[in-house]
Image (tube, helix red, strand yellow):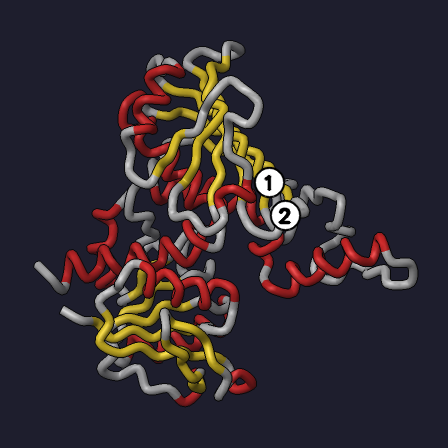
């Protein structure tokens, strides 16, 4: 069966990546539309060996389209997702708008595929935050065996998570450091990002957390297990693509590092690269363009009972956004179109 698919926000980083992945994975498409704001109408985006002309989101008719993959901000999503769903088109949304809505499933297909059945409540499926998506992929198989009580995570998040303008800022600031007179002041970040790290992503909340840190806890509970306690420190680093996370896990039952390594090696969408030698681990630059979540530095935490540490890396534009959205679409047609 072939599916009609509209990509909303097709000219952005995530929208373009969605198009690449749909082509790479040979998604069964009968027709496809690339949609964006009026200023991008008439420009072209690549879809495999085709070039798609961008259409105006404002005037697009979603009637008789099966799926719309949204990769735009929450405000625009609020307006246009309603138009799409009222036309009978199912929305898979990358923004944060619906993630915490009780009536909208928040899905990572390797973790909670069963939740997709709840899409009928609003005809919407939400995609999680990029930092949460890769973490729960790594946590799920371990949780199934030894039940996780608490997670302490520190993230090292690339600038692509903040959009193209943020990537441009890192590039221009880096050049400006070496070229007198071409210095670039921060506009997308609160401080210089080039040759720096910034422990601040999204706005601050009254309790001292940032919204990004709160998201990781709230989304892990919704996707994986409401009883898991999560505390996060989210940091922006001068890397273009690829998020890394240092994760400390406390289990209810014993979990030996050798067992954890074997469990993860046999888990879907995970690659373990964990050698006790120079370079025996994966860094962000090595994960770019890959579909998998990489796990390294698996080791016992002897300071707590049943503790484990690991290092988790993934392409945030893929598993953290575009890939997960496409995987949701694949799961959707498997569950509701092909059975």
Q: Position of residue 248 (x, y in %)?
A: 50, 25
**Farthest residue in the right direction?**
180
Q: Is residue 229 visible?
A: yes
**Residue 156, disc:** 1
**CB-based contact (under 8 Å), mark 1 and mark 2:** yes
- In the rendered image, which quarter is residue 207 located in? top right
Q: Determine whether 256 is above or below 226 in the image.
A: above
Q: Is residue 248 visible?
A: no
Secondary element at image label 1: strand
Q: Determine whether 189 is above or below 70 in the image.
A: above
Q: Position of residue 236 (x, y in %)?
A: 64, 46
Residue at position x 26%, y 63% from top? 26
- In the rendered view of the protein, which quadrant contains the C terminus? bottom left
Tell me if 185 is positioned left or right of 10 in this view. right
Judge the density around disc 1: few (<14), some (14-19), many (≥20) Cα neighbours within 10 Å.
Answer: many
Towards the viewer: 210 or 310: 310
What residue sits right under mark 2 in the picture? 239
Q: Position of residue 161 (x, y in %)?
A: 56, 54
Tell me if 169 is positioned left or right of 150 in this view. right
């Amino acid at each position: 069966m072939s599916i009609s698919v509209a990509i909303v926000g097709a000219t952005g980083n995530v929208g373009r990546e969605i198009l690449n992945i749909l082509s790479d994975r040979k998604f069964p498409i009968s027709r496809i539309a690339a949609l964006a704001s009026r200023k991008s109408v008439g420009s072209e985006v690549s879809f495999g060996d085709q070039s798609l002309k961008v259409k105006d989101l404002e005037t697009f008719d979603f009637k008789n389209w099966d799926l719309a993959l949204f990769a735009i901000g929450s405000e625009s999503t609020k307006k246009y997702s309603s138009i799409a769903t009222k036309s009978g088109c199912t929305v898979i949304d990358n923004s944060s708008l619906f993630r915490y809505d009780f009536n909208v499933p928040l899905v990572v297909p390797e973790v909670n595929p069963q939740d997709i059945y709840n899409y009928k409540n609003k005809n919407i499926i939400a995609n999680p935050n990029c930092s949460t998506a890769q973490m729960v992929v790594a946590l799920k198989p371990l949780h199934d065996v030894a039940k996780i009580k608490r997670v302490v995570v520190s993230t090292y998040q690339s600038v692509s998570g903040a959009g193209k303008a943020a990537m441009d800022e890192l590039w221009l600031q880096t050049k400006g450091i070496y070229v007198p007179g071409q210095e670039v002041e921060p506009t997308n970040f609160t401080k210089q990002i080039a040759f720096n790290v910034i422990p601040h992503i999204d706005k601050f909340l009254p309790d001292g957390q940032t919204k990004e840190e709160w998201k990781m806890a709230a989304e892990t509970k919704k996707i994986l297990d409401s009883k898991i306690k999560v505390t996060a420190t989210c940091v922006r680093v001068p890397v273009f693509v690829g998020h890394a996370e240092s994760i400390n896990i406390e289990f209810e039952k014993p979990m030996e590092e050798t067992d954890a390594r074997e469990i993860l090696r046999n888990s879907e969408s995970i690659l373990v690269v964990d050698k006790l030698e120079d370079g025996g681990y994966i860094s962000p630059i090595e994960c770019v363009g890959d579909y998998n979540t990489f796990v390294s530095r698996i080791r016992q935490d002897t300071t707590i009972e049943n503790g484990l540490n690991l290092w988790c890396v993934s392409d945030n534009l893929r598993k953290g956004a575009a890939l997960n959205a496409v995987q949701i679409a694949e799961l959707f047609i498997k569950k509701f179109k092909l059975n």
